[in-house]
Amino acid sequence: RKEVEQDPGPFNVPEGATVAFNCTYSNSASQSFFWYRQDCRKEPKLLMSVYSSGNEDGRFTAQLNRASQYISLLIRDSKLSDSATYLCVVNHYLQAGTALIFGKGTTLSVSS
Amino acid sequence: DAGVTQSPTHLIKTRGQQVTLRCSPKSGHDTVSWYQQALGQGPQFIFQYYEEEERQRGNFPDRFSGHQFPNYSSELNVNALLLGDSALYLCASSTGTGIVDTQYFGPGTRLTVL
């Protein structure tokens, strides 16, 4: 079983749609969680951290369920500029440092 | 404020050769992590450097080695290149302290092994 699993998509949605991405992780000792966005042939960029209480940043809402080891990202009112790959990321606290563990990513394509 | 920089941007090598990739962390950051991203995959953790020492390593062979300099910049070395080493190599920097260790990525070096 992969440490972080995501539905690879692609998700093809029209502008204005609401889309949800899901992610599961296998290591119950994981401490922090993120969504990164990656545009084609570019580096990943932090979209938002994910907290147990849930958090929102404009049109983006992230949720974490520690009991189910499940993370979600909701995008409301999709824009053309939201087209990208969304990476679910878990931070493992190892003996002497940390390592980000990435899912394969979910591709979103927003069309007009 | 300069972000994370990497050089070179692109590189073409042949099997069996050796390559060195370079990374300068974001100002104020002292920890550098390296990741390999193959086409269609998420980045995979190679190793992390802090205080000039490798403090954590992912599941990569010894052909992958690194170094961190006193100014916190870092190098990734790959020996005896294989076709499967073709990937985007990403460097990420962070402060190395605190519970939430947010990492910021450089633009990457795209390595092609022929």
Image (cartoon, helix red, strand yellow):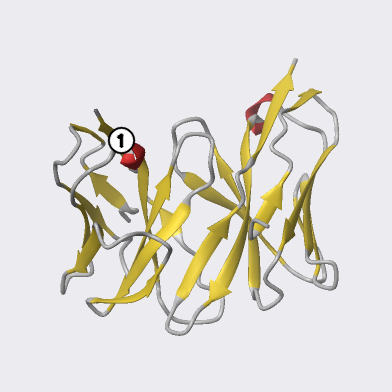
A7 sits to left or right of B29: right
The spot of residue B99 in percent (x, y) is 55, 80
Q: Does residue B73 appear anywhere in the picture?
A: no
Q: What is the crowding at mark 1: few (fewer than 14 residues within 10 Å), some, or many (at least 20)?
A: few
Q: Tell which residue pokes out farthest to the top in this image.
A: A112
Q: In the rendered view, would you say A70 is above or below B105?
A: below
Q: Is residue A65 visible?
A: yes
Please provide percent x and percent y for residue B59.
42, 62
**Which residue is at a point 55% across and 60% down the rendered structure image?**
A101
Q: Residue at x 36, y 65 (%)?
A: B47
Indicate the quadrant containing the N terminus of chain A: top left, top right, bottom left or bottom right.
bottom right
> Residue B2: x and y, percent?
30, 53
- Above or below, A30 against B7 in this view is below
Please tell me whether residue A79 is drawn above or below residue A26 in the rendered image: above
Under mark 1, the amino acid is Leu
Q: Quadrant of residue A77?
A: top right
Left or right of B15: which side holds A47?
A: right
Quickly name the residue at label 1: B83
